[in-house]
């Protein structure tokens, strides 16, 4: 983040990782992202909940986490509405309309980051979920938390929460 702070551009993928009271944020361009709260809860379940000594059932975990997640996302959205130079995008938009979102973000930060022309196809290839997934399967282990019984695979899918809440 220090690289972005020097350029007065801050990106935050999760509401929990941004300090809304920071003086740096007040005079910065902000790119804030949010995601469907149920998808966040399911992701947290597989990242944290399943590592507990006695993992709860997925629905119980979601029920336990959802209020906090919604409160944080609501704070993120509210802050984006009050900040003078902010863009808010959803994870779902990023996956469904990736090329469009890359162009929107590029235009938003081009001047501040002194960017030249971009190669959309190259960016799309570098940010492909299939590329990342294959690297993880190839032995590059996700290390946050360091207590993982298996690789942490991202799919980039949206709406996949439906299958977890309808299984018997």
Image (cartoon, rainbow, N blue to C red):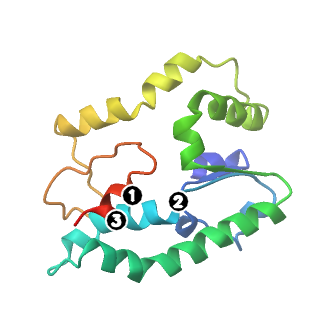
Please identify, in this view, whether the residue under mark 2 or under mark 3 is nearer the observer.
3
Q: Is residue 13 above or below residue 71?
A: above
Q: Is residue 99 above or below residue 81?
A: above
Q: Is residue 19 above or below residue 3?
A: below
**Circle 2 residue:** 36
- The answer to the question of whether label 3 and label 1 lie on touching residues, with beta carbons closer than 8 A, is yes
Q: Position of residue 138 (x, y in %)?
A: 17, 34
Report helix, strand or loop for mark 1: helix
Report the residue at 35% width, 43% height from top: 155
Q: Position of residue 160 (x, y in %)?
A: 38, 51
- The answer to the question of whether label 2 and label 1 lie on touching residues, with beta carbons closer than 8 A, is yes
Report helix, strand or loop for mark 2: loop
Report the residue at 70% width, 69% height from top: 22
Q: CA distance from mark 2 to mark 1?
A: 9 Å
Q: Position of residue 77 (x, y in %)?
A: 70, 64
Q: CA distance from mark 2 to mark 3?
A: 14 Å
The quarter in which the C terminus is drawn is: bottom left
Report the residue at 66% width, 52% height from top: 10
Tell me the number on the disc at residue 165: 3
Please identify, in this view, whether the residue under mark 2 or under mark 1 is nearer the observer.
1
Q: Is residue 156 left or right of residue 121?
A: left
**Circle 1 residue:** 161
Q: Position of residue 87 (x, y in %)?
A: 74, 49
Q: Is residue 26 left or right of residue 65?
A: right
Name the one closer to the observer, 125 or 54. 54
Name the one closer to the observer, 19 or 148. 148
Report the residue at 50% width, 25% height from top: 124
């Amino acid at each position: 983040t220090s690289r972005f702070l020097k350029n007065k551009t801050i990106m935050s993928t999760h509401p929990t990782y941004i300090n809304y009271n920071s003086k740096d944020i007040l005079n910065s361009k902000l790119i804030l992202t949010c995601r469907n709260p149920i998808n966040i809860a399911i992701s947290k379940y597989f990242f944290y909940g399943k590592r507990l000594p006695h993992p709860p059932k997925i629905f119980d975990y979601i029920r336990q986490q959802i209020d906090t997640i919604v409160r944080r996302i609501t704070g993120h959205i509210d802050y984006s509405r009050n900040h003078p130079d902010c863009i808010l995008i959803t994870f779902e938009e990023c996956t469904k309309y990736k090329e469009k979102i890359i162009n929107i973000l590029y235009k938003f930060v081009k001047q501040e980051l002194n960017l030249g022309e971009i190669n959309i196809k190259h960016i799309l290839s570098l940010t492909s979920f299939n590329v990342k997934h294959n690297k993880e399967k190839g032995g590059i282990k996700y290390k946050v938390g360091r207590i993982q019984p298996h690789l942490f695979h991202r799919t980039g899918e949206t709406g996949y929460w439906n299958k977890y809440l309808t299984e018997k």
